[in-house]
């Protein structure tokens, strides 16, 4: 089955700096890659996603890149703000496994004011 | 839309008691997922349903866990008897199952379960 690895597990950045979180996946059939943000005491919330037919997607300060050949995808947050502090999860999914998501282990991001 | 609704939000019970967690998916969504989250094991998929039918329950820890989806707007996850190691946050998520591509899952706020 699919195996998703996520790095780093913790990340601290100064406010205004950029943050990058990286994930790798094992199943070449995976074609959908969402990113979730989980704030303390809340459920994961989708922040951005990318499908395998594109290499990059951007939404304001957040961007995701996908390298299908290398089987890795990354989340980029620019101009970080204290409210970006949360746990971020990547996931991978393929039609072969229905709509099941395989999640990374999460990255705890702290933005220092 | 109200989003995925879960109840109760918090549950404290004693070992051996039956626990029932409830979920109302987003209207119109036809896939529903139950997850468990712990510090040690992260987010684990327990079971998921498509059109009210259980598709994959391989993540259910043992026979003490059972899940049902009697209709498109309601699902339950039951633990009987509960044990301290079941303490975790349980999430329900729903998704509009697409024809070709994969679809986003929308998570509820979770139920925080503590078994004493």
Image (cartoon, coloured by chain):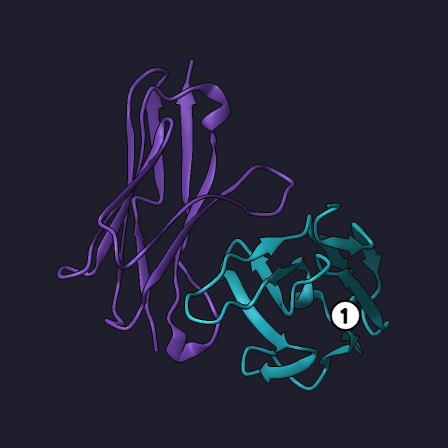
Chain colours: A purple, B cyan
Secondary element at tag 1:
strand
Q: In the displayed image of the protein, which residue is found farthest to the left?
A: A69
Q: Is residue A105 left or right of residue B15?
A: left
From the top left corner, tell me how far across and down residue A5 is, in percent.
Answer: 30, 58
For the C terminus of chain B, the quadrant is bottom right
Q: Which residue appears at 66% of the width and 77% of the height?
A: B51
Residue behind mark 1: B75
For the N terminus of chain B, the quadrant is top right
Q: Which residue appears at 51% of the width and 67% of the height?
A: B98
From the top left corner, tell me how far across and down residue B108 is, in percent.
Answer: 67, 52
From this view, report whether residue B32 is shown above or below residue A90: below
Q: Which residue appears at 64% of the width and 83% of the height?
A: B54
Quarter of the image where one finds residue A69: bottom left
From the top left corner, tell me how far across and down residue A92 is, in percent.
Answer: 37, 62
Q: Is residue B89 left or right of residue A9?
A: right
Q: Nearer the viewer, residue A90 or A6?
A: A90
Q: In the displayed image of the protein, which residue is found farthest to the top?
A: A113
Q: In the displayed image of the protein, which residue is found farthest to the bottom?
A: B63
From this view, report whether residue A77 is shown above or below residue A88: above
């Amino acid at each position: 089955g699919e195996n998703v690895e996520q790095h780093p597990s913790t990340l601290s950045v100064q406010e205004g700096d950029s943050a990058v979180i990286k994930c790798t996946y094992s199943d070449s059939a995976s074609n959908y890659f969402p990113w979730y943000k989980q704030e303390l005491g809340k459920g994961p919330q989708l922040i951005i996603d990318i499908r395998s037919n594109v290499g990059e997607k951007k939404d304001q300060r957040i961007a995701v890149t996908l390298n299908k050949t290398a089987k890795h995808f990354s989340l980029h947050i620019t101009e970080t703000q204290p409210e970006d502090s949360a746990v971020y999860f990547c996931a991978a999914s393929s039609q072969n496994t229905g709509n099941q998501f395989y999640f990374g282990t999460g990255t705890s991001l702290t933005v220092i004011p | 839309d109200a989003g995925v609704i879960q109840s109760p939000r918090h549950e404290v019970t004693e070992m051996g008691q039956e626990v029932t967690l409830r979920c109302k998916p987003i209207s119109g969504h036809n896939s529903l997922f139950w997850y468990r989250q712990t510090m040690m094991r992260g987010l684990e998929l327990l079971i998921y349903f498509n059109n009210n039918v259980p598709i994959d329950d391989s993540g259910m820890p043992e026979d003490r866990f059972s899940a049902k989806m009697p209709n498109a707007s309601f699902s339950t996850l039951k633990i009987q008897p509960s044990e301290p190691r079941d303490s975790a946050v349980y999430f329900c998520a729903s998704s509009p199952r697409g024809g070709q591509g994969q679809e986003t899952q929308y998570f509820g706020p979770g139920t925080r379960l503590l078994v004493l």
